[in-house]
Amino acid sequence: MQFSGLNSSSNRVFDFICLWILPAGYFLLLCSLFFLPDRSLLHKFYYGLFSIPSLIALCLRPRELKQLLREPIFIAMLVFAGWALLSLAWSPGDDGFSSKLKPPLHTLMLFAGCYLLVRYRSEIIQPLLFSAAIVALIASVYNLYMFASIYQPGMRLIGAGSFDNPLLSSHLFGFFCIYWLSLSMTCKRPQILLLTIPAMAIMFATVIATGARTPLVAMTMAAFWLSFICWNRRSVALLSVMVACGAAVLIFFWGMIFGRGDSYRLEIWQIVLQKIADHPWIGHGYDASLIVDAGEGYLLSEPHSFALGVLYYVGILGLIPWLFFQGYALLCSWRHRVQPLFIIASTWMIFGIGAGLTEGGGIISRPKEHWFLLWIPLALIAALSINQRAGRLLAMSIKKLSQPAFLSLSANARVIEEDGLGPKVLRLEDGSFLKLFRARRWYTSGSFNSYSERFAVNSERLRELGFPTPQILDLYRLDDGSSAVHYTPLPGNTLRQVLQAITAPDVRQALVERFGKFMAQLHERGVYFRSLHLGNVLVLEDGEFGLIDVADLRLYPSALSLALRQRNLRHMQRYTADRRWLFEDHFQALLQGYGVTASQAAVNRLHKQVLADSATAQVS
């Protein structure tokens, strides 16, 4: 009993980390630089709300490491970090090893945390990115307004919050400009598309105001990548807009672009390459110092190129895994470009590669602006890759179904379910089903993850857990904004229909007991089916149970808490027939079946809850 209680507590801690702490930490990592007074607070927020919780989660459930260690991107990152730490053996730095261990560890925890976040809260990733982009948009409007009120010729926008350098500020403004650009190419809702256009214009104006030229090159590269990775009619428009914007920038900002020359980049790179030639294979060491005098009147400590920085510190042997995890991430994103998150993350990475051509140099650092050029998009791609391979993300494209095509598909169909707005479930001529989901408001989660997508993903994930679900054939997007899922139904009748047809009490009792065992299996596997009732459970031809209408379902990291189990039972008590069969006539059989899989504590708690609810209902 003591071990069981300890295990339950660790599960609750793990669930709380994955479901609540990591989303909050990731959101603050993305947007807190816009409003925090300095970077040290960002470090504290990241350590306390993302890195350390991710480490605790891995300690509580070490088996999660297996998924990470099967991902080529993460393996290459481990090799890169390991080689960097090994280089301390010949590095001239005199700092302690423990201080140098922390940045790679925190960077690795970014990968681990992103993996856990995508695995257990995949539906929240797009709303999180959108919310962070809204914060960046509001901050950019404020920064532009304040900058315009004090502007004098030659001034460059730095921005409020933690920003102290216009070039570093431009990385974040460009990062979120690329987000809005990517969203404009992947979103399906007209309301979101209309929002992305002014948002892009504002973020682009903020980049221009910084006077930085590197983001312009990086954004051009990202736009070209984006136009090809999701090639459609919008790609032609994007390429046309790029030409127009490029011409406008050259006309109106010629002096800003060419007036400063190459900013001594060629001289800096030449000096750094000479230093690299001293130790080309193994580098100077992870914590080696770099001093560059390019004749500017002050000394520089960065090579102003990520690739040259890697070569200087860890040599060619360190450059190999560094190039590999970027190349593999882009290849993986191209293969899975049906998933919008891959498109967004890979476009961020292209932006970072472009920006890193003439900026940066430190290989592994604490969270700062340079993270947005490499580690943040790379960690997201790695997490998406792991979960895509495990079948936890949508792997099929959503087809557009015009009104004539819909009428043709549904010709001679039989209406199985409908509401005041029309049919909801149709049985087509070939025996397959078409389930329709009404359009939701644009600001709800349904606009980011439609219920038809949730239906498809939940079906696949439940099948992997061993629970029979319908086989998905196609996903559709209709002209009116609603969506549909086309699937092969499971052969069988609903449990409610079967119980209605049974006249022998002993047979009905045995079936209720088996259902109690099935329900406990769902709860123990972390399946919280909000709409669980006897009409959504099928009795299959082989006597096993299956689930239908699984869009309104959530998979938790651990077995359901007692509170969620009680909530699930209360939902079933709302149906008169279900309540009579399950909680009145055969309640003991239900508990007996439930106790085959679930703990006695769970059985006792559910027993007390049902008795209390029954007493309350009698009084009322």
Image: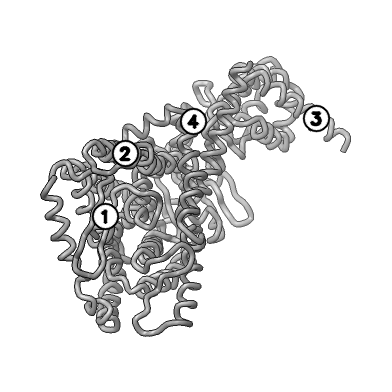
**Residue at the (39%, 65%) spot, across then down:** 169
> Is residue 281 placed above or below 239 in the rendered structure?
above
Pointer 2 or 4: first along the chain: 2
Task: Judge by depth and name the residue closer to the eye, 12 or 267.
Answer: 267
Circle 4 residue: 491
Identify which amino acid the numbered label 2 is placed on.
Phe
- Label 1 residue SS: loop
Q: CA distance from mark 1 to mark 4?
A: 61 Å
Q: CA distance from mark 3 to mark 2?
A: 51 Å
Q: Residues within 10 Å of mark 4 (few under 14, many from 20)?
A: few
Identify which amino acid the numbered label 1 is placed on.
Gly
Circle 2 residue: 74
Give the quadrant of the N terminus: top right
Q: CA distance from mark 1 to mark 3?
A: 65 Å
Identify which amino acid the numbered label 3 is placed on.
Ala
Circle 3 residue: 612
Circle 1 residue: 361
Of circles 3 and 2, which is in front?
A: 2
Of circles 2 and 4, which is in front?
A: 2
Pointer 2 or 1: first along the chain: 2
Displayed quadrant of residue 239:
bottom left
